[in-house]
């Protein structure tokens, strides 16, 4: 199969940012361009959007929040409470709120 060299001029910053996206997707820039061209032929037009989330996954934020809560509990001397002690604290807090409402 004969191949051709395709040269495209783009700004360095655009090339670098795109290369980072492709790397995160597990492909290199040449593979991404070949994928684009093949799909363009199949679709007879601009083919598709291949995107990564712009914000961290909720699981990542949740994990960070758990770490922060653990650090806060450690700092406040609460990290060694048993489950029974934690439940007792929750019950006491709920009771206190009920009493304030009455």
Image (cartoon, rainbow, N blue to C red):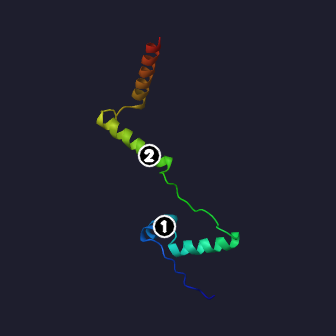
Q: Which residue is drawn at the image coordinates 59% and 75% (left, top)? A: 34
| Residue located farthest toward the top when viewing the structure as drawn | 102
Please state which of residues 7 and 89 is positioned toward the viewer in this rendering.
7
Query: Number of marks in the image?
Result: 2
**Dot 1 and dot 2 residues touching (CB under 8 Å):** no
Q: Few, some or many C-alpha atoms within 10 Å of disc 1 (few <14, some 14-19, many ≥20)?
A: some
Question: What residue did someone put label 2 on?
Answer: 63
Q: Which residue is drawn at the image coordinates 30% and 33% (left, top)? A: 76
Residue 29 on image: x %, y %: 51, 73
Please state which of residues 14 and 29 is positioned toward the viewer in this rendering.
14
For mark 2, give the secondary structure: helix
Residue 70 on image: x %, y %: 36, 40
> In this picture, is 35 found above or below 78?
below
> In this picture, is 84 found above or below 43?
above
Please state which of residues 13 and 60 is positioned toward the viewer in this rendering.
13
Residue 18 on image: x %, y %: 48, 67
Question: What residue did someone put label 1 on?
Answer: 18
**Residue 100 marker:** none
Please state which of residues 56 and 13 is positioned toward the viewer in this rendering.
13
Q: Quadrant of residue 36?
A: bottom right
Residue 59 on image: x %, y %: 49, 47
For mark 1, give the secondary structure: helix
Q: Which residue is drawn at the image coordinates 42% and 17% (left, top)? A: 96
């Amino acid at each position: 199969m004969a191949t051709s060299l395709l040269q495209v001029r783009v700004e360095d910053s655009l090339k670098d940012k795109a290369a980072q996206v492709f790397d995160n997707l597990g492909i290199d820039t040449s593979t991404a361009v070949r994928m684009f061209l093949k799909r363009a032929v199949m679709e007879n037009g601009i083919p598709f959007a291949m995107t990564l989330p712009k914000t961290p996954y909720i699981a990542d934020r949740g994990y960070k929040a758990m770490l922060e809560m653990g650090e806060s509990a450690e700092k406040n001397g609460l990290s060694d409470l048993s489950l029974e002690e934690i439940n007792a604290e929750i019950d006491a807090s709920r009771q206190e709120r009920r009493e304030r409402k009455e």
